[in-house]
Image: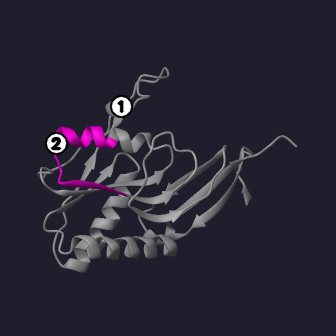
Amino acid sequence: MQKNTKGLSESKVIMDGEGMKLVIERLGLELLENYGDFENTVIIGLQPRGIQFSVRLADYLSKTLGKPIFQGKLDITFHRDDFRRGNEVLVPNSTQIDFLVEGKNVILVDDVLFTGRSVRAGLDALLAFGRPAEVKLLVLIDRKYGRDLPLQADFVGKEVDTVSGQKVKVEWSDDASNDRVILYTKQTNE
């Protein structure tokens, strides 16, 4: 593990750009196995951190199938159960769903699944756009421990065992080879 320059935490890269590329390809192949030509399937990324992942996944699927994939982004700000807490005024992100979800298979995409609260908010927000045939959850990282809600992902890039005080952060770059997933651990007083 490396010390953060501020000395507040230690960090460890748990997935680099090449690993993330392989995970995206594997997850894309799993989706193709389950949904074929994506004729009745759409991908929706949860704002803010699931968007880049859903874009990369849709790009891979589009190249593989040789046709565009319906991909949208969903803001969950005012569907969260904690949006009224704190003193900060929350600024919502944009929602962009330029297609019908009614009767579609929806792949809901987020970067990290931890407590499940973002996913619950995403489900609430999604239902404002219609009633999908089914909704499946796809995540890059499943933190396994720490769920507040009884939710689990249907498609998982990597499971990570974490303990209290650890944080998983996904960093996306313009150059996919520089993408990475970092595990941060708070330092104890020595």
How packed is label 2: few (under 14 Cα within 10 Å), some, or many (20 or more)? few
Eyeballing the image, is 37 above or below 155? Answer: below
Q: Residue at x 17, y 74 (%)?
A: 37
* 96 is higher (above) or lower (below) than 29: above
Q: Quadrant of residue 67?
A: bottom left
What type is the residue that disc 1 sits on?
A: Val
Residue stretch rendered in magenta on the structure:
122-137
Residue 124 sits inside the magenta stretch: yes
Q: Residue at x 12, y 53 (%)?
A: 103
Along the viewing direction, whichever of 20 and 109 lies nearer the viewer: 109
Q: Amino acid at mark 2?
A: Phe
SS at mark 2? Answer: helix
User: Picture coordinates of residue 75 (x, y %)?
Assistant: 30, 41
| Relative height, residue 188 to residue 140 (above, below) | above
State the image coordinates of residue 139 (x, y, percent, origin top left): 42, 58
**Quadrant of the rendered image containing residue 92:** top left
Q: Is residue 136 magenta?
A: yes
Query: What label sits on residue 129 in the rendered view?
Result: 2
C-alpha gap between disc 1 and disc 2: 21 Å
The residue indicated by pointer 1 is 91
